[in-house]
């Protein structure tokens, strides 16, 4: 077997592992086929979480739960870079939830929940629940009319939860008027601010467990229609040794691709938060928060509209009685949590390939379509009941998903019997930015065209950095500064990606 070249960073880390026993037990080399963005969606989620931790700590320096709305408007209108910081933290939360949904959807499609990764899927589902809880708490903290109206409405609906959950929620949320709270401010804001930090810490702890399990199992092998093929790369030693596309890569390449995902995530959030300031506008040269303060009288006339990631839950409460809606919501969560065992013991699928999992794919497609339909429907009917037609439409969606997909996938199964096939999701989704010999080869030295692109990228970064230094008014120019910073992060991600690919073994 050809020996793999190791960079100076690999040698340092291996030296560290020999003396501490940490490295190599927590982060494993990835095979060559895995260097595509669709294999690293979890790293995007991790980047968004890290971004939220940092920006959240900075926002907390100015946030006063005893007077939440005034402290929010002060941060936005008076603090240099404060409006940008508020926008970054708000859009970062959206980014984390969106990336989490994409990550879970991809893992469902490729069957990454299957044995022996059942617990990892369940831990990931718990992470999703904690992330939604964290977003719910954070959404309420500015104490504006829309957010606090939706928050209190949600709490009222949650009192219908069965199995004693309603009593647990009441124990955490019912409290007397606290000292030091501004007149008219709900004392629950102070409690929610504390919970926001507690749930954030829980996300960090559960995320650590999730990553530990992931590194223990290793990255998933490419999909195959063969039955009973092992889904652990450790059981494919022959291919790891002989197949160039399976060859384990130096860990510096792993760090490189992780850095790329972080820079891409940070850059995208900076660009969006600067181009579309979150509930913020410029008014006569002044930065203004657009949302009015919560007022009980106005709240009674304001339809409660939750944020987009809770619309699908709100939909159930608009369709059936609160008690039945709570049962539907809990059943939805239970099916998601236990889906690996449903797939294994009820559907009895024997392969991770989507074609070989017709029942799972049909059920999952019903979930995805109903999630989208329910969210849009709830958004378009603020403050109005939908009636039982809502859940009836959901039932039709699930039935049609099975009617359309199950026989089609079974037919494809029969056509492929006795054949082996590799399902390349990255190519199907247009994400096949692979460093394998089959898809991309960057010889050493780099080509003139690539050298030129690197030079131009570096020059553009220098120009943008100089432009950023000319922006001296950190209050009025903060969104332009953030936009330029986002562009620079994306450009830097490109350079890191080129360096990472350049180190690929030929």
Image (cartoon, helix red, strand yellow):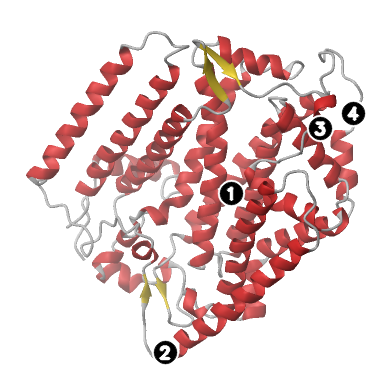
Residue 443 picture location, percent across and down:
12, 52
Near mark 1 (Cα within 10 A), the count class, few <14, some 14-19 or many ≥20, is: some
Q: Relative to residue 74, is residue 334 depicted above or below?
A: below
Determine which quarter of the picture holds residue 347.
bottom right
The residue sitting at 57% across, 37% down in the picture is 93
N-term-proximal mark, 4 vs 1: 4
Q: Is 495 displayed left or right of 376 in the figure?
A: left
Separation (CA) of disc 2 from disc 3: 60 Å
- Please report contact status of discs 3 and 1: CB closer than 8 Å, yes or no: no
N-term-proximal mark, 3 vs 4: 4
Separation (CA) of disc 2 from disc 4: 64 Å
Residue at which label 2 appears: 415
Residue 346 picture location, percent across and down:
67, 79
Separation (CA) of disc 2 from disc 1: 41 Å
Q: Secondary structure at mark 4?
A: loop
Residue at which label 1 appears: 209
- Please report contact status of discs 2 and 3: CB closer than 8 Å, yes or no: no
N-term-proximal mark, 2 vs 4: 4
Tag shown at residue 338: none
Asked if one can make out residue 485 in the rendered structure from this viewpoint, the answer is: yes
């Amino acid at each position: 077997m050809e020996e793999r070249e190791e960079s100076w960073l690999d040698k340092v880390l291996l030296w560290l592992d020999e003396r501490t026993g940490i490295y190599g037990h927590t982060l494993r080399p990835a095979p060559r086929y895995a260097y595509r963005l669709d294999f690293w969606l979890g790293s995007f989620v991790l980047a968004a979480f890290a971004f939220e931790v940092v920006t959240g700590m900075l926002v907390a320096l100015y946030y006063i739960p005893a007077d939440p709305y005034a402290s929010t408007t002060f941060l936005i209108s008076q603090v240099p870079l404060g409006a940008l910081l508020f926008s970054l933290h708000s859009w970062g939360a959206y980014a984390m939830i969106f990336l989490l949904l994409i990550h879970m959807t991809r893992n469902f499609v490729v069957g990454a929940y299957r044995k022996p990764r059942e617990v990892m899927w369940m831990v990931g589902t718990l992470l999703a629940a904690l992330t939604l809880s964290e977003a719910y708490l954070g959404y309420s903290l500015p104490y504006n009319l829309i957010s606090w109206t939706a928050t209190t409405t949600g709490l009222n609906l949650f009192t219908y939860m069965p199995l004693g959950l309603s009593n647990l929620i009441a124990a955490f949320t019912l409290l007397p008027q606290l000292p030091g709270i501004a007149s008219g401010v709900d004392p629950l804001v102070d409690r929610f601010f504390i919970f926001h930090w507690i749930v954030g810490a829980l996300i960090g702890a559960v995320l650590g467990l999730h990553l530990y399990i992931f590194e223990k199992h290793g990255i998933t092998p490419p999909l195959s229609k063969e039955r009973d093929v092992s889904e652990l790369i450790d059981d494919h030693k022959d291919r790891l040794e002989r197949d160039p596309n399976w060859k384990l890569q130096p860990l510096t390449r792993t760090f490189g691709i992780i850095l790329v995902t972080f820079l891409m995530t940070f850059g995208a959030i900076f660009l969006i938060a600067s181009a579309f300031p979150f509930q913020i506008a410029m008014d006569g040269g002044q930065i203004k928060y657009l949302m009015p303060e919560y007022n009980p009288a106005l709240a009674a006339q304001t339809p409660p509209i939750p944020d987009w990631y809770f619309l699908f839950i709100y939909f159930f409460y608009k369709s059936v009685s609160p008690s039945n809606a709570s049962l539907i919501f809990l059943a939805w969560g239970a099916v998601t949590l236990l889906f690996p065992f449903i797939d294994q013991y009820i559907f009895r699928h024997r392969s991770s390939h989507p074609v070989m999992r017709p029942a799972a794919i049909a059920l999952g497609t019903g979930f995805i379509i109903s999630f989208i339909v329910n969210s849009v429907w709830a958004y378009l009917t603020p403050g109005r009941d939908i009636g039982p037609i809502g859940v009836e439409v959901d039932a039709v969606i699930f039935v049609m998903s099975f009617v359309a997909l199950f026989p089609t996938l079974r037919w494809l199964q029969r056509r492929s019997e006795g054949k082996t096939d590799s399902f390349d999701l990255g190519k199907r989704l247009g994400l096949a930015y692979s460093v394998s010999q089959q898809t991309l080869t960057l010889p050493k030295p780099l080509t003139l065209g690539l050298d030129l692109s690197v030079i131009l990228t570096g020059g553009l970064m220098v120009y943008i950095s100089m432009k950023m230094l000319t922006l001296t008014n950190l209050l009025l120019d903060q969104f332009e500064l953030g936009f330029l910073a986002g562009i620079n992060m994306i450009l830097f991600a490109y350079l890191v990606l080129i360096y990472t690919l350049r180190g690929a073994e030929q």
